Amino acid sequence: MIRSVFLLVATWLGLCSFGAAQQARDAVTYTPVEYRDKHQHGFEVDLNASLYSTFIFRGRHLYDGISLQPSIQPRYSLGQYGTVSGLLWFLAPLEGDRASDTYFVMDQGLAYDYTYSRFTFSVGQYWYGYPKRSNSVNSTSELWGALSLDTILSPSFTVYWDYDAFDSLYYEISLSHTFKQSGDGAFNMTIFSSLGFASNAEKVYDHGGLVQITSGVSTDIELGSLTLRPMVAYTGSEDGATTNKAWGGVSILWSF
């Protein structure tokens, strides 16, 4: 545990130093707050097309190869009463012959967000689906709840309860910070870290407690109505079922 905390602190110090001189399936499925805030009106739709070098989900290396991960997220603002949203997310493997050894993924979700002062409370439901289901793949469902705070490092805490195939709990603590410059050609950089914990998860991980740490960096490049977001990250294993791996990709976001 001490080694894990040291790794997290060291990663943060390194990324913060770089940023001051010049941010997964979960990361993909949420539209970052700084992007959403630019498009506040009644009904909105976020489109996201992402290309990643590999697929790591909560520390587990599920597909070793390039994949396309598009999503669509309709959202309706209830004004002072919060926001309701839906999600449709896909993973399509692109590694030629290796694609036939894996599966096409289609996930669906519903969520509700409510903001009071600097706090945002969120609850939702995910359905994880595999149209080309095999004996090694299980479709499942989970409920989740999150609390985030609009302050330095944007801390958030999320609990996921898989009440279906795996009957397990997964907890995530996330931190992020965006460095911005002003003026023409301004540069921005977001650094982010997340710690994943599990309990009652013998069907997923080797043990309970801390199972993975992921840290990374991204930047937003405005291209008219589109946003181009390249990112790189590193996942550190704290459990026999998770992996140590550097990975990255690029996303194109459009909101209307």
Image (spheres, rainbow, N blue to C red):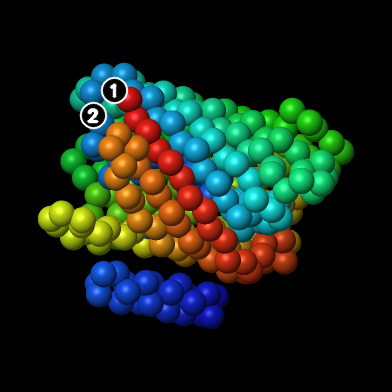
Question: 168 or 236, which lies in front?
Answer: 236
The answer to whether residue 23 is above or below residue 158 is below
Which of pointers 1 and 2 indicates the residue nearer the eye?
Answer: 2
Q: Residue at x 50, y 62 (%)?
A: 233
Q: Position of residue 170 (x, y in %)?
A: 57, 50
Q: Which residue is mark 1?
A: 77
Secondary structure under the numbered disc 2 in the rendered image: loop
Amino acid bearing label 1: Ser
Q: What is the distance, in whole Å, between disc 1 and disc 2 at their CAs?
A: 8 Å
Q: Are marks 1 and 2 in contact (CB under 8 Å)?
A: yes
Q: Amino acid at mark 2?
A: Gln
Q: What label sits on residue 40 in the rendered view? A: 2
Count of residue discs? 2
Q: Is residue 32 left or right of residue 93?
A: left
Please tell me whether mark 1 sits on a helix, a strand or a loop: strand
Q: Is residue 163 visible?
A: no
Q: Earlier in the sequence, mark 1 or mark 2?
A: 2
Q: Is residue 76 left or right of residue 40?
A: right
Q: Quadrant of the N terminus?
A: bottom right
